[in-house]
Image (cartoon, rainbow, N blue to C red):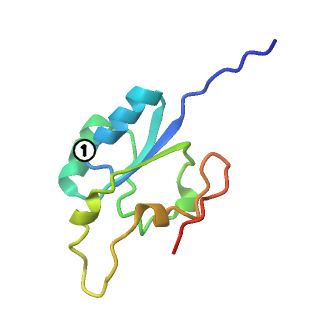
């Protein structure tokens, strides 16, 4: 009889904030964080202090997702959308974390189809 060896999931974090959701996911599932994506300078300082070796990808709309390590669990702090309401002139829509990575494959699976 074969025994499957469980591998802890690799986790990616969009609109990370201070990392609270990431800590909760790690507590529930185990796993390792691969990267964060956060633009707020204060939250970014907290992330850098607690995860000094993790890259912060910054603005999710400017990331080359083909160069980012694939993850099996993707977290996203959607309440950050309110903060993103301060947009530069000419930018009419807020970045959507799911649309920013919709073309990205997670753990070798095809990307989801998003409505609209």
- Most extreme residue toward the top is 1
Residue marked by disc 1: 18
Q: Residues within 10 Å of mark 1 (few under 14, many from 20)?
A: some
Describe residue 46's horizontal placement relative to residue 103 as left or right: left
Residue extending farthest to the left is 42
Q: Nearer the viewer, residue 40 or 9?
A: 9
Q: Position of residue 97 (x, y in %)?
A: 41, 61
The quadrant the N terminus occupies is top right
Residue 64 vertical position relative to residue 22 in the rendered view, above or below: below
Q: Residue at x 67, y 50 (%)?
A: 109
Q: Secondary structure at mark 1?
A: loop
Residue drawn where x is 35% and y is 33% of the image: 24
What residue sits 51% from the left and 64% below the top?
64
x and y percentages locating residue 25 in the rendered image: 40, 35
Residue 87 rendering spot, x and y as whole percentages? 25, 76
**How far across and how far down the image is residue 90, in percent?**
29, 88
Query: For this view, does 12 lie left or right of residue 44?
Result: right
Q: Residue at x 31, y 55 (%)?
A: 38
Nearest the viewer among 68 and 90 is 90
In the displayed structure, 21 sits above or below 88; it is above
Q: Quadrant of residue 21?
A: top left
The reply, left or right, for residue 55 in relation to residue 2 is left
Q: How many marks?
A: 1
Name, please, the residue furthest toward the right: 1
Q: Residue furthest front?
A: 115
Q: Is residue 63 above or below residue 1?
A: below
């Amino acid at each position: 009889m074969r025994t499957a060896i469980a591998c802890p999931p690799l986790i990616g974090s969009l609109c990370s904030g201070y990392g609270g959701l990431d800590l909760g996911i790690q507590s529930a599932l185990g796993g390792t964080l691969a990267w964060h994506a956060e633009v707020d300078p204060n939250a970014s300082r907290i992330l850098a202090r607690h995860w000094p070796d993790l890259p912060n990808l910054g603005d999710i709309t400017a990331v080359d997702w083909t160069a980012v390590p694939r993850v099996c669990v993707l977290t996203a702090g959607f309440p950050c959308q309110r903060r993103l309401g301060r947009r530069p002139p000419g930018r009419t829509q807020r970045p959507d974390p799911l649309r920013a990575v919709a073309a990205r494959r997670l753990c070798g699976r095809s990307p989801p189809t998003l409505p609209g």
